[in-house]
Image (tube, rainbow, N blue to C red):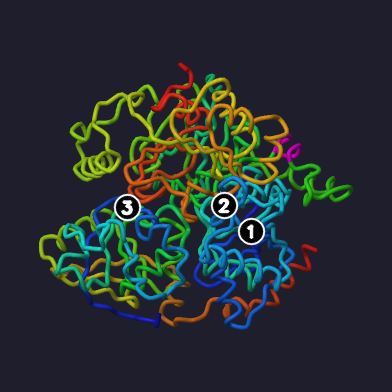
């Protein structure tokens, strides 16, 4: 995915705490290569679709107002469990660019940044407030600005989030992290020589 | 002020301090499995090579079939294993593949082969990599992009986590296993309690554990939200490691021992957080819901959502009970099961199989019950002492090594609505198959459920 600085998009609330990566993408889809046809349908598959493939109307992303969501506003410990990066690939395939939550599974959190997804951590009460506002007015947009590290709520309140400068730089530049690390070749070789 | 074991190991692996508080860490050991194949493909596409194939080791565990007799997989699975075989051969990486008795679950064979050593920084593209922390190693799971990064550079960018010490003091009662200890810990600190932290498990109850038991505890650190969990190495650790195929020997062994004895946290080391449990309070435990934190002593009843004040918590509890097909207030020992699964990186080692066999011996499974050893060598050792015959005589199925029904990636799943007494690590919705219902427990408890057909207090069997 290309680098981004600012996005204003429909945001969908995911109210369940501890949403695990098995729920984000069930294991049986993991043998499909990233980006294979229909990858976006794997996202939340078993809570989103019936066995016959019909949409479950109660699931938030199946509701007309939230269909075009590019931002998810989740609850505590979203993305916990398995290290499967396919959870992020499925979110990206659906078009999600930002996940806002009070806390995220550590490996999922890391995987987001490797794929150009912004994970923004905000206090629990702020995030609960955002989810409430999105429920009250389905289809509302949030504005997320990477440069100023802010989320602007539908009613205009601005919330600043902390972001690791390294991760921020990678998101802004869209740089290949391996290429960056290979620039440390001298230090790596020296470390190996010291250890040998 | 002294240092924690985590801080000591971290400091020994710093290659460079990077921008924005990130540290470039050197990786001593990289373990790979079929799920790592995508990283090899991207690496090849960018024209890069594996920097240190000699520090990387691979096996096939997630996708291989475990039905007796090692049957041929379908084309899709076959191509995943074939791809890993080809990539590792091309890059000169040791691969424990089909037909090799050393093949098995990556977190079982690492320690078994002596690839996992105290003081190491070890990573693997699997969230249960914390298992190796039982040896006093800094071991954590990584995503596919990070796997590619380690292959190319033998390093990783990480931000230093906080430290959390979980102390369990006292003696465990009879019938209480390491699995009960970690389920009790997760229920206490919560499924997100360890997010952003490295856990050290300490206290007399942990010290008294065998290496297999310590591995069970460390394995489920991620179910408490922590990427890594560790136990200080001691004589039990050294005795386990000595003589393993890839462990240091001769003079190198003596030098390694001297380094390893320095690893435990200093007495005056300060942790960012502390949690304490009393071993005497821990009973045989089962999960009732869809998060590992939903765990209770087997003597309890299914919780009642109506009794929960917090509306968010109440709704998520109600949702969990609906998925699990459980009514509030029912005694856990009244819950009937349809299957039992004994295996996974949490509980598939020889000690686990012995504990299950002790319960199975002379009894008869009344539901389908699978025993899936953690490795070819575990299977061989179990057969040498007759555990396979005990299980088979009791009507259990004795299978080949692999991850199997813990994760169901290979198609070995339970049917929708089926209730599984399982020694695995996750009771998430759909984890063991779409619509399948998982109750996590120890090997002895799973065997007890298999022979009674319901959740059972193994102490009363």
Residue that carries the numbered disc 2 in the rendered image:
B129
Q: How many marks?
A: 3
**Upstream in the sequence, badge 1 or badge 2?**
1
- For the N terminus of chain B, the quadrant is top right
Q: Residue at x 49, y 70 (%)?
A: B20
Q: Are marks 2 and 3 on the same chain?
A: no
Secondary structure category for the residue under label 1: strand
* Residue B110 located within the stretch drawn in magenta: no
Query: x, y (%) of residue B48?
Result: 64, 80
Classify residue A104 by image quadrant: bottom left
Tag 3 residue:
A76
Callout 3 secondary element? loop
Looking at the rendered image, the disc whose residue lies closer to the viewer, 1 or 3, is 1
| Residue B239: in magenta span | yes
Disc 1 sits on a residue from what chain?
Answer: B
Mark linked to residue B31 = 1
Q: Magenta region: which residues?
A: B234-240
B299 with respect to A14 (left or right): right
Q: Please identify the dominant SS of the magenta region.
A: helix
Distance Cα–Cα, label 1 vs label 3: 30 Å
In the rendered view, does B116 fall on the left or right side of B6?
A: right
Q: Residue at x 22, y 61 (%)?
A: A13
Q: Quadrant of residue B347?
A: top right
């Amino acid at each position: 995915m290309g680098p981004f600085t600012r996005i204003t998009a429909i945001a969908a609330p995911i109210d369940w705490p501890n949403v695990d990566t098995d729920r984000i993408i069930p294991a049986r889809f993991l043998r499909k290569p990233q980006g294979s046809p229909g990858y976006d349908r794997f996202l939340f598959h078993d809570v989103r679709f019936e066995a016959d493939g019909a949409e479950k109307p109660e699931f938030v992303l199946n509701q007309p107002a939230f269909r075009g969501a590019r931002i998810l506003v989740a609850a505590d410990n979203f993305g916990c469990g398995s290290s499967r990066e396919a959870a992020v690939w499925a979110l990206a395939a659906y078009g999600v660019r930002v996940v806002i939550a009070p806390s995220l599974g550590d490996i999922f959190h890391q995987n987001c940044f490797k794929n150009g997804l912004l994970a923004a951590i905000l206090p629990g009460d702020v995030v609960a407030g955002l989810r409430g506002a999105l429920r009250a007015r389905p289809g509302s947009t949030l504005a997320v600005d990477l440069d100023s590290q802010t989320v602007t709520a539908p009613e205009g309140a601005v919330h600043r989030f902390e972001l690791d400068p390294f991760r921020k730089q990678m998101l802004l530049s869209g740089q290949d992290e391996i290429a960056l690390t290979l620039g440390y070749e001298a230090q790596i070789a020296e470390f190996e020589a010291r250890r040998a | 002020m002294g240092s924690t074991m985590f801080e000591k190991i971290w400091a020994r692996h710093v290659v460079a301090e990077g921008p924005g508080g990130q540290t470039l860490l050197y990786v001593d050991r990289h373990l790979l499995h079929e799920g790592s194949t995508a990283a090899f493909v991207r690496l090849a596409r960018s024209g890069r090579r594996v920097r240190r194939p000699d520090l990387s080791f691979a096996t096939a565990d997630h996708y291989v079939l475990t039905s007796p007799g090692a049957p041929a997989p379908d084309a899709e699975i076959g191509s995943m294993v074939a791809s890993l075989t080809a990539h590792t051969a091309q890059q000169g990486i040791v691969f424990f593949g089909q037909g090799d008795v050393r093949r098995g679950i990556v977190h079982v064979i690492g320690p078994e082969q002596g690839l996992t050593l105290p003081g190491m920084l070890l990573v693997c593209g699997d969230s249960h990599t914390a298992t190796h922390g039982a040896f006093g190693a800094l071991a954590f799971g990584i995503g596919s992009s990070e796997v590619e990064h380690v292959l190319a550079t033998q390093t990783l960018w990480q931000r230093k986590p906080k430290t959390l010490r979980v102390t369990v003091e006292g003696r465990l009662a009879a019938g209480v296993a390491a699995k009960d200890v970690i389920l009790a810990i997760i229920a206490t600190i919560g499924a997100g309690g360890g997010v952003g932290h490295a856990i050290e498990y300490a206290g007399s109850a942990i010290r008294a554990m065998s290496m297999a038991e310590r591995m069970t505890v460390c394995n489920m650190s991620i179910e408490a939200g922590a990427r890594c969990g560790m136990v200080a190495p001691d004589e039990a650790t050294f005795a386990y490691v000595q003589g393993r195929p890839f462990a240091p020997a001769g003079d190198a062994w003596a030098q390694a021992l001297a380094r390893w004895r320095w690893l435990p946290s200093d007495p005056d080391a300060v942790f960012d957080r502390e949690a304490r449990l009393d071993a005497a309070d821990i009973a045989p435990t089962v999960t009732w819901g869809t998060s590992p934190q939903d765990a209770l002593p087997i003597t309890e009843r299914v919780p009642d959502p109506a009794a929960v004040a917090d509306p968010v918590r109440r709704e998520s509890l109600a949702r969990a009970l609906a998925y699990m097909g459980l009514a509030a207030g029912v005694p856990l020992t009244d819950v009937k099961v349809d299957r039992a699964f004994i295996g996974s990186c949490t509980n598939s080692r020889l000690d686990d199989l012995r504990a299950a066999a002790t319960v199975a011996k002379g009894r008869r499974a009344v539901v389908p019950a699978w025993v899936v050893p953690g490795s070819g060598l575990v299977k061989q050792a179990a057969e040498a002492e007759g555990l396979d015959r005990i299980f088979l005589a009791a009507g259990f199925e004795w299978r080949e090594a692999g991850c199997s029904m813990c994760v169901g990636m290979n198609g070995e799943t339970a049917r929708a609505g089926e209730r599984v007494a399982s020694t695995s690590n996750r009771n998430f919705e759909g984890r063991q198959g779409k619509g399948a219902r998982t109750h996590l427990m120890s090997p002895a408890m799973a065997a007890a459920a298999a022979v009674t057909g319901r959740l059972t207090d193994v102490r009363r069997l």
